Image (tube, rainbow, N blue to C red):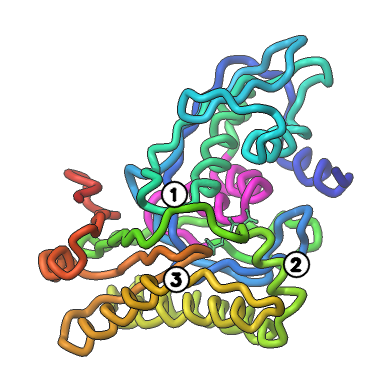
Amino acid sequence: MSSSKYQFIHNIIPHLSPSQKGQGRANVNIALAKYWGKRDIELNLPTNSSLSISLPGLGTETTIQWIDNSKDTITLNDQPCKPEQPFAARLSHFLEPFRPDPQGGFEIKTHNSVPTAAGLASSASGYAALVLALNDCFQWQLDLKSLSLLARLGSGSASRSVYDGFAIWHQGQQQDGMDSFAEKIDQAWSNLKIGLLEIDISEKPIGSTQGMQQTVNHCELYQAWPQKAEKDVVTLQSAIANQDFTLLGTTAENNALSMHATMLATWPPICYFQPDSIQAMQQVWQLRAQGTEVYFTMDAGPNLKLLFLEKDQQQLKESFPNLKVIHPFSVESETTT
Ligand code: DP6
């Protein structure tokens, strides 16, 4: 691990003396303007800002405890993980700079409430929950900005999962990464709904970390992306401020397709679409042509996330019988199937 990463972390955390068993929980988020590309791999610094919405009720709960004279022990949904498993290896690597001494280990218990059927990546909620648990374990009492900075090191999108509702992750300019953190956009939108449309939940051929690296290095169209993404973030901020759903939906859908265009224009090409993904997109376009205002976004996988307003929920449930509806801003019931 490079000294710049240790320096970054020790600029933020006050000490390394654990005082109790720590707990943290965080929700997954989906980006309406995507993060796709790093300008610094070690510090997880993005080439562009991004903007997301949190999905309440779908996330990660983690407890962490420091144990002297032990190795890391990690369980995921009550199943012990072998240290060499990619999930455990990535977590232990992330925890390196937080170890009070080289002899001990962390005991980590993680539960994901993200249903596998939703096809949602859980690294965003996972690393946000882990950082919140560390903050509790060490009693650092960090503010949300500092927690976002630390979560970013685990997974870029985790910087946004520290917050509920809308969040913006500022790409920042500094080399040390101290200005690249997420902030909450303090605005609710009570009739805005998200629909999770499962296409395929089997493991994707290429993860987002590798996929974005390959795109940055081998796509001639990529140079247009950071500017486009920055513009979309500004447009989305104004759509949210004015509750302009048409502007929100068109910008989010176009942003997602633009990101996928850079992947397709990479060599070797990266294609997360499956035939059923395309069919679902066409169904969305058809519904729009018929007057139902619905848009989609897609991440590094074949599943679609639909954006629509409450008044069209019934119609969408009829068009997509498996749709899982999330209510990002209503308190009484967060999810309905
Ligand atoms: C397409 O945050 O999973 O979902 O920083 O390498 O862990 P790492 O990548 P990750 O990438 C998310 C990519 C995305 C878009 C987004 O969430 O903004």
Q: Secondary structure at mark 1?
A: strand
Residues at discs 2 and 3 in contact (Cβ within 8 Å): no
Residue 16 falls in image quadrant: top right
Magenta span: 143-168
> Considering only vertical position in the picture, is 245 above or below 170?
below
Residue 210 tag number: none
Q: Residues within 10 Å of mark 1 (few under 14, many from 20)?
A: many
What whole-number distance in Å separates the C-alpha atoms at marks 2 and 3? 29 Å
* Mark 1 residue type: Val
Membership of 154 in magenta stretch: yes
Q: Amino acid at mark 2?
A: Arg
Determine which residue is flagged by label 3: 274
Q: Nearer the viewer, residue 46 or 180?
A: 46
Mark 3–mark 1 CB contact (< 8 Å): no
Label 2, label 1: how far apart the Cα atoms are? 24 Å
Identify the residue under disc 1: 28
Q: Is residue 170 above or below residue 23?
A: below
Element class at badge 2: strand
| Separation of marks 3 and 1 at Cα, in angstroms | 23 Å
**Whether residue 212 is situated above or below residue 93 in the rendered picture:** below
Residue located beneath label 2 in the image: 39
Residue shown at 41%/75% (left/top)? Answer: 252
